[in-house]
Every structure is written in structure tokens, then in C-alpha cells.
Image: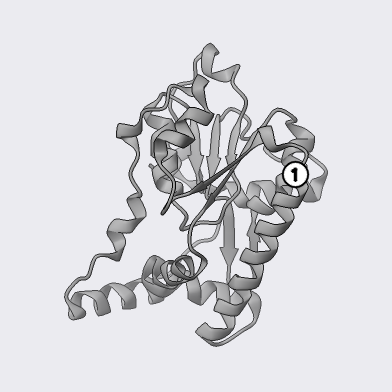
Amino acid sequence: MRGQVVAQTLETRTLPRVVAVGFNKCGTRGLGQLFAAAGHPMVHNKLRGKFKVSHSIGRLMRDNLAAGRKVFDGAQEYTFYCDLIYTTPKAAYDGASAYREILRDYPDTILLLNTRDRESWIKSRLRHGHGHFAKVQMQAHGVTTESEICDIWRSEWDAHHRQLTDFMADKSDQLIVFDIQKDKIEDLIARLPGYGLDAKHWQDIGRSRDRKMHPLKAWVKRQLALHKPRLYR
């Protein structure tokens, strides 16, 4: 589902955008599937350009803000946005932090705070990409150990959740908090009655990656993930 675009109808375009402003590894792939299955154009982390070359939605957001453009300039055709992080060995940016600017530029937007238990989220991030994500995050933050990057993530998590909920205190009708481990998908769907979402299309897709595999296979996958050349767009 990464970067998939579904044909947009007039009906879906009249609906407010929904932007997931929780972190990656908090059900973003499953949420993207939920909206895509209902016929909504959505972007999950990557925008697909010409010749199937992908570009990060997070990088687009960062560059737009730096240039004084609207947050989603160049990608305003979507109904649902999720997994807005952009990380390279030199810089880390998460578009989820741009919730103030999102509401400034698109005042009717609904913010979805997708969340989960913080420590299980950290463990999931450490496993993400067979360790490559954590490696690049450590490089971007200038640290060398997992314990250091985990402490940084904890601080970012706590600050983001606190600041977002404080900012939205007087706009509660535009904030939905959805805990992927505790809340029922039916409750989320009930908060978005006009979107035609169907609970049968929901699954926490990323959890399949947590299944145990043979140690040798796991080691090979990790080595390939850590050492293969990558382009950061």
C-alpha cells in the first residue's frame, strides 16, 4: 500500500483531509489500507512519481514549510496522509510535528493521533527494517548506542503527545485519538461517518513483521538491510 493512489471522486474530495499525526510503527499501513479500501486517495510515507520513482511525503512537507508554501503543496489531492517521517543519515524530520501548520493551511482537517504503548512502540522501531531505521536515526541524531536513541524517542514521544493534545484542547472535534492496541476500529469509524470506512478492511499490517523466524534467516535479512545501498528522496 505504500504510496498507493486511488481515483478520487467528487464526493471524496468534499470531505476534510484526515492526517495521521502519530508516529510511524503505530498502525499507519493498516490505517492507509482502511481508507484506500473505501476508495479514498491516500499517501503512506512515499509519493510515487514518474517512472515509479518515489519521494518522501515528509521531505515534501519539510521543504514546503522552509520555502513558505502550504504544507501539502504538490500533494494536495489526497484524503488521508500517514507515516510522514523522513530520515537520512544527516537529518530526521517527522511531518507529524507540523500539525499547527496543517490546520493553518487546511483549517477543516481532522487530525488522527494514532498511538500505542510507548515501550512496545520503541521495540517495534528497533526492529523496523531489520535494524536499519534505528541505525539511520542514530546517525541523524549523532548518537552511537541503542539506549541513547531510545531515550531520544521517549522524549520525542512524550513531548509530541503532550503538545498536540494541549494545542487541540479547544478543537476537540477535529482530534481523534486511536490506540491501535486498545481501541476498537468500529469506534474510529464511528467518528468518521462520511468516509464509508469498513471494519473488515482494518488490520495492523506491520505486526506480521514481528513474527519469529529462523535465526539464520533473521541474521541474513538484517545484514542485507543494514548494508545495501539506499537513496534518500
Q: Quadrant of residue 163?
A: bottom right
Residue at the image position 58 percent from the left and 58 percent from the top: 86
Q: Position of residue 18 (x, y in %)?
A: 58, 34
Q: Position of residue 96 (x, y in %)?
A: 64, 51
Whether residue 109 sits left or right of residue 150 in the image: it is: right
Q: Quadrant of the C terminus?
A: bottom right
Vertically, is 108 above or below 146? above
Does residue 48 appear in this view? no
* Identity, as a three-letter code, of the amino acid under mark 1: Ala
Q: Residues within 10 Å of mark 1 (few under 14, many from 20)?
A: few
Residue that label 1 marks: 169
Residue at the image position 33 percent from the left and 50 percent from the top: 205
Whether residue 112 sits left or right of residue 165 in the image: it is: left
Residue at the image position 62 percent from the left and 64 percent from the top: 157
Q: Quadrant of residue 186?
A: top left
Q: Position of residue 101 (x, y in %)?
A: 77, 43
